[in-house]
Image (cartoon, rainbow, N blue to C red):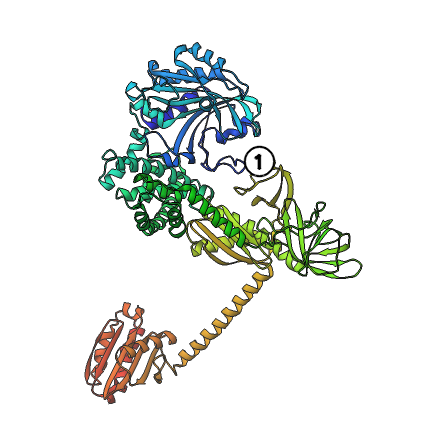
Amino acid sequence: MRTTAELREGFLSYFESKGHKRLPSAPLTPSPEDTSTLLISAGMQPLKPYFLGVKPPPATLMTTYQKCFRTTDIDEVGLDGYHLSFFEMMGNFSVGEYFKDGAVELAWEFMRDHLEIDFDLLWVSVFGGDPGLGLGEDEVAIAAWEQVGMPRDRIVGLSRSENFWQAGETGPCGPCSEMYYDRGEELSCGRPTCGPGCPCERYLEFWNLVFMEFDLAADGTLTPLPKPVIDTGLGLDRTAAVQQGVISVYETDGFQAIMDWIEAETGIAWTSSKKATKAHRILADHGRGMTFMIADGVLPSNEGRGYVLRRVIRRAVQQARAIGLGDLWRISDIVSDQLGRWYPELEENSDRIREALRAEEERFSQTLERGMGLFEEVAVAGAISGEDAFRLHDTFGFPLELTRELAREQGLAVDEEEFTTLMAEQRDRSRKAASSEGEIRVTGPPTDFVGYEMTDVLTAITAYADLEDGTFQGKLERSPFYPEGGGQVSDGGWIDHDETGGRAELVRAIRVGDDQVLTFRGSGFSEGDRVRAVVPRSTRFPTMANHTATHLLHKALRDTLGNHVQQAGSAVRPDKLRFDFSHEQALTPEQRAEIERAVNERIFQNVPVRTFVTPIEEARNLGATMLFGEKYGDEVRVVEIDGYSRELCGGTHVRSTAEIGPFVILSESSVGSGARRIEAITAGEAWAELRARSEELDGARTEIERLRRENVKGSKPSSGAEVTFRDESDGIVVAEVSALKGSALRDLSDQIRQTKNAEAVLLGSVDDGRAYLIVNIGRSLVDNGLDAVAVARKAAEKIGGGGGGRPNLAEAGGRNPAGLAEAYRVARGEIAAALEAPE
């Protein structure tokens, strides 16, 4: 096994032969319940629910190839020969089957019989123990290695930082044992302590066996897992470097294919200079990472994984410009050609990948052009002040990472502390400028929200605070008022005093965790008063209709545009709904029509809408849609549109889709890079819109009919001339007009033939003592052999002139206006004969 492809298939086939089930790579985007990282960063991460006993595994023995991305290494890529942000991990996993002895035996056999590795150059490390964890040296692992024949003097114990594996701050963890390949003294740092785990390049770690025994809690305590797990990770690129006898992973076949393309496009070899080497490495790594992220539904944005993608693309664009590579987006085709066999999503999403990369590259190229002038100007001073970095960020959109990278290339320092201070001051100013209307002034027992079932309820004020501006804050014992949250606005409504009849209008319902605080405008109320709380149907019902419609819209968008569509925000109000979603391009008219049709189809099918509360794990098992970044409790509320949509949602909804009424999209627009917005209406608002459109169309039809009748009369053609119609029989119109000639006369003949739906038009005119005659015939007459030019020339003999033109439109002219009547007769006879002739 030498090539990357051979290693990938060889590893999977070997473990399949040992009873392991081959699983495909999971997407780079973690499942909604996994909030530990923005992107999958380890081969075992998608399998964590199996290791923790949350979900049953598809098999107790598994083998995978997993695409991974580590955000912490982005800025290191390019500076050396081994850092990568995107990489592939091969893995074999056992849930409660074999443990340390079995894992070591399988690894040894694969290295011996398939990699045929030189065991004299192999070293292994084991966990050396850690007092803080209460664990000693891993003697079981040492014995397992000795059992297969590994010399004890090449088994070294390393610290927790090196040989105790964990995916995040908390979660599955355990001691591990790593395999290192000794690449020779010439790569050694020369220190007496140089050995496995040394940061120099002599000892390359390429395989890690994790003996997952524990679940690490936030307080640092270890709890044994339900079943001990073996989780191994073999770095595909590092193993390829060992097998191909090269020092850097960038020298392996997987990266060289991309670098060869870069050299062909720029004429600059990756070894030609330090600048070129860095650029090639960054482009090869980031080219793979950004292609895979977009294939898995990530789009550039200013937050979360979208910002990670934006950083990667922009860093790659800057390096591409440095070596003269334009249209960097094309690199995605090289990645797809190389890896599409293993990752079909690359080919399936190739158009979307190209478009997203091209759009971001174009935007950032403009940013580079604007900001590079200022950067070069401030760089002359010998350092980049925090104020300069802030100005580059605030005025030109330069992310700090780019400023840092450019400065590092010129050996300049950046005052990041001052930059951070200025950014904090800006955020503080923004906070102070924001409204303080959300300030809570009351405390009291939790409110029982009954608004899902009731909109008119007798209750009591359990807390009260006068805000001294004609409003007061309060809490109710039971409340029908929905507090703003989940994209849905606060309910409107009022409370009526049970004794005095006084009324206070609801201004705002503030969500406080699972509780609420209400602000009312009115007076004559105090703590302990009995009141009637009312949400009028006129505001609640259209809000419910709009909220359920957003769920239908979300599903229709994903069905029409693809699974990359993710909700990016929403606003549900009584008068309309707004839905923001991830998508790079404007909708085509066909896509917009299909989405509107799909939503209305489900509405007219009168599909039941059900809500229920269930444990979050059950909701996950049901495939309920969850929003990334949202924090959910142990129990969640699910809104299910039978057989179509299932989402976690705390909002108010109709009981069946038919209650929504018509759904109408008002607009679709951009709200930033990679994000679109749809505004739509339902129920009464939609009916009013459709009624207005119908009335507008009726008015347009009336106007068109009026114009048609005027044209038929021919009394005032567009030329403004008076037309006299001499004959309109047998499909031939003979007409005359005064003082027109040339193109105006020809255009008028076209207008008459269209409005009269005539087979032919003979249009005469007298202007300045000359006679003119237009012969305008339809295509069917031309196809039957009639030639308008021949007709015009015969008629021209009667007016003392000649004629010419095209087979369907010809003109005669002469100095004898008195002969026009005879010219009409001759021309009409020729046309009539052609009409009567058999086809």
Q: Is residue 832 left or right of residue 570?
A: left
Q: How many marks?
A: 1
For the point 31% across and 73% down, which residue is it?
A: 835
Farthest front residue? 381
Seen from this angle, which residue lies furthest left?
801
- Percent of width and height locating residue 607: 60, 49
Residue at the limit of the structure toward the right, as seen here: 499
Q: Is residue 451 above or below residue 837?
A: above
Taking the spot 31% from the left edge, 31% from the top edge, the residue there is 250
Position in image of residue 153 (x %, y %): 39, 11
From the viewer's side, name the closer residue of 755 and 599: 599
Snapshot quadrant of residue 469: bottom right
Q: In terms of image quadrants, where is residue 821?
A: bottom left
Q: Which residue is mark 1?
A: 621
Is residue 516 in sight in this rendering?
A: yes
Q: Position of residue 211 (x, y in %)?
A: 49, 20
Q: Is residue 332 visible?
A: no
**Where does residue 718 sit, x and y in percent of width and height?**
36, 79
Q: Is residue 306 above or below residue 524?
A: above
Taking the image as shown, residue 496 lies to the left or right of residue 759, namely: right
Would you say 813 lies left or right of 191 here? left
- SS state under label 1: helix
